[in-house]
Image (tube, rainbow, N blue to C red):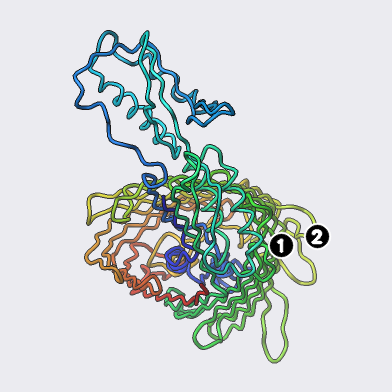
């Protein structure tokens, strides 16, 4: 048996940079007279990609035959008739103190699983090979339930129709570690004890333990099982460990707006095992190419709690923005501090679910500069508690492509009146809120749904949806923002935003080349976003904006991912006098990753 879990999920990190790159922009709603000026960063500007090793589909290969082999049928060529009236499943026989073989007790869950096999046996006399058919049926049922086990036919005389079959279930009695786990030795030792405690050994339980071990930042584990040549069912695990000390991720793209810079670059460094508590410490930064319009810095730490896969994360982001809007000199500063507790509910190869909750402290401030001095414009101070549920399920083809995949997420956010949070329509120190009717204590529900269906070895179809519902008008930061970084490709990031929104995307894909090192895909897309604002004087209300286009994705050696997209918007971004249809865009994103390993 072989289990393999990769530590560095390159495809997930690269996809994060392509699907949610570094910067976005949203229209500010300043006091009358200033117009629709882009100044304050939206969540997409500030929410730089964070480490998330559990996002990618795990690659685990299981070969159980070597651990508990099944012998060929010894009765296939015998022309003997038997009548089976009852079947007794027992554990393997061992020598008793008197030197006589004695069957060992069978685990209750195994006995329950096999209980109804006897009733399904045909009545009357049957060829003796039916014994092998019963054996194989029991083995198939155990296999389907995930147990690493074999069913054997011990020497016996079938008298009065009573058949006895021995069920040999696997148990890991020893684990030999090859490689250096670095600072994760104690964490890995706890995972090994979890594996040894699995009696009887079930692949799904072992997969969960190994997946959680593979989720440890910087750790790659591979487990192979072989017979111990001692008691029946006893196996030895050979655990190969590869540890990465650090990783570097970089991205460049031209998804931005003219006001806040078309081209941006992002770099993030991750240090693994600083405390030895299944942790990753990271720092990152994003900037426009000329270092003028916007700079964003991030730092954070994620650590494991216990051996169940629960993690505690803290993050901090700070941004400086100075949009290019002609003579008007607007300068903004934004801060986000957050803490999040995440707990896996289900962790397996094909099905995963998790729950997380946390708190965010958000502050954004904009000032108008002129003649060497400045005056206040907008200030929002949000304190938000959130609860998030995420689940995914899927099945892969033998070549690793998705046969089908489905992922869903629901997040509930509640603004709190704590820690000097803004109040509705509050004006203090010359500052006004970004939206005068925006409620800092509003309730927001967000949902995401993504699905992929494989249509053969070449074609596949992706469909996605996003939705947001709010209890009332929101401040800028909590609004749903459309554009290149979310749904609505072709529109400038944050070109429009809303309190409530529904967005959908359809993306047919075609694999045009694949080798061991390189994969190239063609894709087309159609995006549609419906927005609704709840302000009493809202102009951007009950609108639908859509776009279409296509492009090319190229991945190389799990280290480099490039995407080039042509996008054609079909609508005006804003309903303001003189506005024209948003221009066509040619979008480019290139992401690379480097991570040395220690074996």
Task: Name the foreground residue: 322 vs 391.
Answer: 391
Q: Is residue 281 visible?
A: yes
What is the secondary structure assignment of the residue under circle 1? strand
Residue 141, quarter of the rendered image:
top left
Residue under pointer 2: 419
Residue 419: x and y, percent? 80, 60
| Residue at image point 45% right, 23% down | 89
Q: Relative to 422, is 406 above or below?
A: above
Task: Name the foreground residue: 226 vs 445.
Answer: 226
Task: Name the foreground residue: 246 vs 341.
Answer: 246
Q: Relative to 471, is 140 above or below?
A: above
**Where residue 361 is drawn, which disc sits there?**
1
Residue 179: x and y, percent? 53, 68
Residue count near mark 1 (Cα–Cα under 10 Å), binned few <14, some 14–19, many ≥20: some
Q: Assess whether mark 1 and mark 2 are in contact (beta carbons under 8 angstroms).
A: yes
Task: Name the foreground residue: 288 vs 187.
Answer: 187
Residue 333, quarter of the rendered image:
bottom right
């Amino acid at each position: 048996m072989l289990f393999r879990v990769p530590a560095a999920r390159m495809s997930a990190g690269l996809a994060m940079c392509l699907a949610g790159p570094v910067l976005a922009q949203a229209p500010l709603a300043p006091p009358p007279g200033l117009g629709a000026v882009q100044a304050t960063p939206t969540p997409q500007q500030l929410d730089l990609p964070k480490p998330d090793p559990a996002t990618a589909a795990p690659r685990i290969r299981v070969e159980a035959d070597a651990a508990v082999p099944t012998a060929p049928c010894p009765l296939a060529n015998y022309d003997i008739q038997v009548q089976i009236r009852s079947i007794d499943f027992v554990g393997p026989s061992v020598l008793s103190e008197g030197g006589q073989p004695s069957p060992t007790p069978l685990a209750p869950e195994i006995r329950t699983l096999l209980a109804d096999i006897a009733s399904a046996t045909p009545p009357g006399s049957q060829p003796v090979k039916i014994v092998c058919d019963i054996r194989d049926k029991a083995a198939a049922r155990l296999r389907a339930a995930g147990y690493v086990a074999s069913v054997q036919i011990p020497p016996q005389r079938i008298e009065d129709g009573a058949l006895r079959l021995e069920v040999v279930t696997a148990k890991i009695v020893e684990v030999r570690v090859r490689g250096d786990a670095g600072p994760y030795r104690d964490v890995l030792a706890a995972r090994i004890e979890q594996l040894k405690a699995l009696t009887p050994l079930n692949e799904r339980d072992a997969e969960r333990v190994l997946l959680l071990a593979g989720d440890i930042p910087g750790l790659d584990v591979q487990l192979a099982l072989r017979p111990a040549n001692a008691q029946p069912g006893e196996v030895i695990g050979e655990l190969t460990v590869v540890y990465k000390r650090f990783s570097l991720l970089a991205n460049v793209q031209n998804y931005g707006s003219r006001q806040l810079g078309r081209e941006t670059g992002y770099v993030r460094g991750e240090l693994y095992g600083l405390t030895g508590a299944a942790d990753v410490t990271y720092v990152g930064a994003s900037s426009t190419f000329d270092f003028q319009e916007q700079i964003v810095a991030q730092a954070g730490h994620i650590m494991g709690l216990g051996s169940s896969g629960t993690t505690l994360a803290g993050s901090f982001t700070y941004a400086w923005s100075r949009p290019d809007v002609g003579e008007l000199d607007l300068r903004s500063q934004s801060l986000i501090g957050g803490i999040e507790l995440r707990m896996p509910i289900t962790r397996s190869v094909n099905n995963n679910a998790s729950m997380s909750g946390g708190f965010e402290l958000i502050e954004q401030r904009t000032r108008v500069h002129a003649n060497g001095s400045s005056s206040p414009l907008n200030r929002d101070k949000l304190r938000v508690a959130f609860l998030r549920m995420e689940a995914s399920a899927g099945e892969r083809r033998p070549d690793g492509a998705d046969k089908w995949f489905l992922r869903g997420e629901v997040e509930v956010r509640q603004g709190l009146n704590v820690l000097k949070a803004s109040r509705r329509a509050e004006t203090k120190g010359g500052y006004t809120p970004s939206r005068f009717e925006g409620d800092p204590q509003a309730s927001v529900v967000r949902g995401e749904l993504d699905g992929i269906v494989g249509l053969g070895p070449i074609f596949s179809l992706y469909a996605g949806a996003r939705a947001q519902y709010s209890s009332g008008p929101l401040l800028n930061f909590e609004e749903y923002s459309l554009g290149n970084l979310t749904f609505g490709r072709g529109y400038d990031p944050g070109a429009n935003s809303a309190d409530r929104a529904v967005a959908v995307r359809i993306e047919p894909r075609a694999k045009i080349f694949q080798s061991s090192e390189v994969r190239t895909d063609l894709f087309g897309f159609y995006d549609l976003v419906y927005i609704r604002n709840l302000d009493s004087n809202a102009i951007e209300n009950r609108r639908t904006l859509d776009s279409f286009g296509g492009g090319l994705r190229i991945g190389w050696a799990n280290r480099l991912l490039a995407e080039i997209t042509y996008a054609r918007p079909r609508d005006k971004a804003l309903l303001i006098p003189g506005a024209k249809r948003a221009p066509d865009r040619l979008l480019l994103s290139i992401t690379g990753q480097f991570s040395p390993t220690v074996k």
